[in-house]
Amino acid sequence: MGAGKKFYENNGFESTIKEYLKQARNKLEHELTGTREAMRLIAIDKTQDFLKVMDRGLDKEERDYLSALIVASMYQSFCYGYGIGKIEGKSDSKIIL
């Protein structure tokens, strides 16, 4: 086990970030409906961009899957950004992963 991991475990970093991730998911699911909808629309646009650049067609199921994958990535990025921001706000220092 590396010294960095031990440091984070000793300071409760893992449990803190997990709690903030849970809070972010809850906010995204229940409060930030506009943000969720914007992410969905962006994912649809990115799927269309992908089809144009690749010059390849996908059937509806494949397009839906690609859009869902993009949305899931955006949700995850949002949650991690929220969690890291909360930790940085409480510790008044930058977190570098």
Image (cartoon, grey):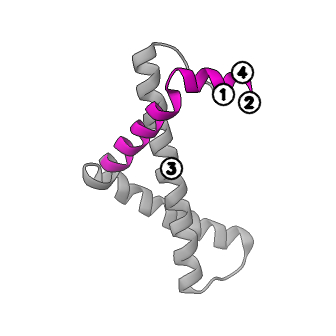
Check disc 4 and report the residue beneath it.
Answer: 3
| Residue 2 place in picture, x, y as percent | 74, 26
Q: Which of 17 and 31 is in front in this view?
A: 17
Q: Which amino acid does label 4 sit on?
A: Ala
Q: Mark 2 points at which residue?
A: 1
C-beta proximity under 8 Å, tags 1 and 4 = yes
Return the residue at label 3.
76
Q: Tell me the CA gap for discs 3 and 1.
A: 22 Å
Mark 4 → mark 2, Cα distance in angstroms? 7 Å
Instruction: Please give the range of residues in magenta.
Output: 1-26
In the image, is residue 7 part of the stretch drawn in magenta?
yes
Residue 39 lies in the magenta stretch: no
Which of discs 3 and 1 lies nearer the camera? The answer is 1
Q: Nearer the viewer, mark 4 or mark 3?
A: 4
- State if disc 1 and disc 2 touch (CB < 8 Å): yes
Residue sitting at 40 percent across and 37 percent down?
A: 20
Q: Which numbered disc flags the more N-terminal residue, 3 or 1? A: 1
Structural distance between the alpha carbons of marks 2 and 1: 7 Å
